[in-house]
Each structure stands twice: as C-alpha cells, then as structure tokens.
Image (cartoon, rainbow, N blue to C red):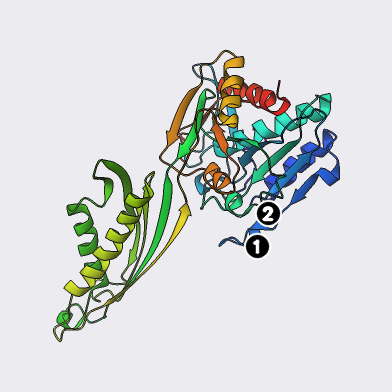
C-alpha cells in the first residue's frame, strides 16, 4: 500500500526507487550491493532514475537467480490512495476518488520482490547468488528491460518477473510488437472559398484506414491460418473546419507471435497510406506526402516447458498447493527483452486485476501467495 501511494509514472520512478533502497538498507543490505544503471539517459523520456539492481553473493552454491518487477505505473494511477476492504475476501482498492487507478500494476510486483529481499536479509536465510531487478519505463516501451545489460545483472541463469494475474499463472511467451509513427503532409486551402486547391491530410488518413479495415489488415488480422493484430490508435489533425487540413499525425501498431505475419501487417499499413496519398489530389494534380517511421518495440518469445526457470516456477507454485497453468500473452512484457538478452524469464502473477483502469484492485490472498512463491524461488528450497 505504501508503494502504490507513491507517485511514479514512467520516467519519474525516482521516489519509488528511493523507497525500495531505504527498505533494503533498513533490512541490512550492504550499500555496495545496490546500484543504478544509466538506462534513463538513453530512453525517449529521459527519466529521473535508472534501473535499480541489487546483487547478493550466494550463501549456497548454485546458478544465479533473478527476481524482477517494473517500478512505473500508467498516468491514471498517479495520486492513488489505496485502502483495504473486505469484498469477497480482502482487496486493496482505490479510495473514493473515481478518477484514480490503484497502481497494483506493477507496484504489487515490486512489493513481492522487495519483501523477498527483506525476508532473506533480515532473517539471514540461505540462498544462491541473487539479483533483484527493479526496472524503469515498462509501460511506455519496456525501456528498462530493453536497455539493461546482462552483465550488470550478473548473467543469471534463472529469472522470474512478477507482473500481472493470479499467482498460479505462469506466462512463458508473449507476442512481438512493432510501432509506427505516420506523418501526412497535405496542402492547405480555404475550405469554403477554394477547397479544390487543397489536399486534405485527414482525407488521406481516412482512406488509408478504411482500406486497412476493408482488406482485413486492421484489428484482428488472420492470414494463411496465422493470427496478428493491428491498430491505428492515435490521430491528431486539423485546426479549423474552414481550412483543408494541412497535416495529420498518427500512431499505429502491429502485433503478432509470428514474425513474418507481423512484418506483412507493417508493410500493409505502409502501403495503405502511400496508396491513399496518390488518391487525393488537388484540382491541378498535386498530392500530399506521407512519412512512416517504424521500429520494433519487442520481439516475440516462447519458452519451452522444460526450460529451467519454467520448471522451477511450476514447482514453486505447486509447493504452496496451487496448480500451475501456463499462459502465452498477446501483450508485451519485460520478459520479451530479457529473452532477447539471453536470459529466459517466466512471468508470474501477483494479484492484480482490471489493470490500467480506475476499477483496478489487488487480491490480497493472491499477492500473499506470490510472496511465498517468490521466497521459495529466491532461496531455491
């Protein structure tokens, strides 16, 4: 509840990190075990703090294990005032402010990892070499996990990410995502006096989006028995009704577990906008221009059921009386980039529900189960 009350949107995680460090040091964590990288200096947001990394030498022999969670929340959760209520068990919900989300995504994950470290430090529990990783800027592009160095993390062999869902859910794969920034340049003119002299950037955007919908490249995309998704999610254009719109800026995305299909979706989006430019002309035959700037947000990954981190996670979940269930996500996770760094990472739930909304709530029982699972994973027993 303390963590959820701290304001710390993407790029502003400094106060969250300071709280974590304070709690670790109070539990006896040596200062030399705590470090920050400079990932924030390389992100588009230029945040106020880097990734927080805590490395402990092992008191037991074994491969290094990593537990992680991301510190940032989405904007709707800024100003959260968590309260504990008895609703079908115990839940942590937001206070009476209907405009504020809770921030359990992913402060409950941070709390799971932090409480695990505190238990080990304060009780002197035996453990293999450990890394606790508190990542920045997950919500805006998985930037903390993207920019972290595997060497800085100690090159762990087993890794566990706490972020979302029930405690028995183990996410072993996730989709890949590609983002596109689309800039359309039209030709302005007076919409009442001489509309024929202009080229509407809005008309170009509308034709492009309509063609994507008509040809099955927008929303759920199914081609040749494979599945992906796309979305034009942001459109900013125009200044007045009496001016033919000179510019339009759009943001779109393509997702898919299958890289070739995802690439086809990206090419279809690019083609739709280029075709639309040629279709909208002024009276003297002039056309507008379009620029599409795309980049890979994260590549898809899928862990095998016999991957050591998956096996360890299943055993830990079963050890507290739950039946582990494997899941594959259609959203991106920090685990996508961890896999790209050569660190196979399974993602475990810690009780968050209805995330990214004002109705978000935390299942206390599931959170406590996640804490027990994390402690078992960290101590390897």
Q: Is residue 5 above or below residue 250?
A: above
The answer to whether residue 271 is seen in the rendering is yes
The answer to whether residue 357 is seen in the rendering is no
Left or right of 200? Residue 295 is right
Q: Nearer the viewer, residue 277 or 147?
A: 147
Rendered location of residue 154, percent (x, y): 72, 44
Rendered location of residue 3, percent (x, y): 66, 38
Q: Nearer the viewer, residue 64 or 248?
A: 64
Rendered location of residue 111, percent (x, y): 66, 33
Q: Quadrant of the N terminus?
A: top right
> Residue 161 appears in which quarter of the rendering?
top right
How far is mark 1 from mark 2, CA to CA? 8 Å
Mark 2 crowdedness (10 Å alpha carbons): few <14, some 14-19, many ≥20: many
- Residue carrying label 2: 50
- Residue carrying label 1: 41
Q: Secondary structure at mark 1?
A: helix
Rendered location of residue 192, percent (x, y): 17, 78
Tell me the residue at 83%/35% (across/down).
26
Do callouts 1 and 2 mark residues in contact (Cβ within 8 Å)? yes
**Numbered marks: total:** 2
Mark 1 crowdedness (10 Å alpha carbons): few <14, some 14-19, many ≥20: few
Q: Secondary structure at mark 2?
A: loop
> Residue 251 appears in which quarter of the rendering?
bottom left
What residue occupies the far top of the structure in this picture?
321
What residue occupies the far bottom of the structure in this picture?
284
Q: Is residue 377 above or below residue 25?
A: above
Q: Is residue 305 above or below residue 200?
A: above
Q: Quadrant of the C terminus?
A: top right
Left or right of 77? Residue 197 is left
The disc, 1 or 2, on the residue closer to the chain's N-terminal end is 1
């Amino acid at each position: 509840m303390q963590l959820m009350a701290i304001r710390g949107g993407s790029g502003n995680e400094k106060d969250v990190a300071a709280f974590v460090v304070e709690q670790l040091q109070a539990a006896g964590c040596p200062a030399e075990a705590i470090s920050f990288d400079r990932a924030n200096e390389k992100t588009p947001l230029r945040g106020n703090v880097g990734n927080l990394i805590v490395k402990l030498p092992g008191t037991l022999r074994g491969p290094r294990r990593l537990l992680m969670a991301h510190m940032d929340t989405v904007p709707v959760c800024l100003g959260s005032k968590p309260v504990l209520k008895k609703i079908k068990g115990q839940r942590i919900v937001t206070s009476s402010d209907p405009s504020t989300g809770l921030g359990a995504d992913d402060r409950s994950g941070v709390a799971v990892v932090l409480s695990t470290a505190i238990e080990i430090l304060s009780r002197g529990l035996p453990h293999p070499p450990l890394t606790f990783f508190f990542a920045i800027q997950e919500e805006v592009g998985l930037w903390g996990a993207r920019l972290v160095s595997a060497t800085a993390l100690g090159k762990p062999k087993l890794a566990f990410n706490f972020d979302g869902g029930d405690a028995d859910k183990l996410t072993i794969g996730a989709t890949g995502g590609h983002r596109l920034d689309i800039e359309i340049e039209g030709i302005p003119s007076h919409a009442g006096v001489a509309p024929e002299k202009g080229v509407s950037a809005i008309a170009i955007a509308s034709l492009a989006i309509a063609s994507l919908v008509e040809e099955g490249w927008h929303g759920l995309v199914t081609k040749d028995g494979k599945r992906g998704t796309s979305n034009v999610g942001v459109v900013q254009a125009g200044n007045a009704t009496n001016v033919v719109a000179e510019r339009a800026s759009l943001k779109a995305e393509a997702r898919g577990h299958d890289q070739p299909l995802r690439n086809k979706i990206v090419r279809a989006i690019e083609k739709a906008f280029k075709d639309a430019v040629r279709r909208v002309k002024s009276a003297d035959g002039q056309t507008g221009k379009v620029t599409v700037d795309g980049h890979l947000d994260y590549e898809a990954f899928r862990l095998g059921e016999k991957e050591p981190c998956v096996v360890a996670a299943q055993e830990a979940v079963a050890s507290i009386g739950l039946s582990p269930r494997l899941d594959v996500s259609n959203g991106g996770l920090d685990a996508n980039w961890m896999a790209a760094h050569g660190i196979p990472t399974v993602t475990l739930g810690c009780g968050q529900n209805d995330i990214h909304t004002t109705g978000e709530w935390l299942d206390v029982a599931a959170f406590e189960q996640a804490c027990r699972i994390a402690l078992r994973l960290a101590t390897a027993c």
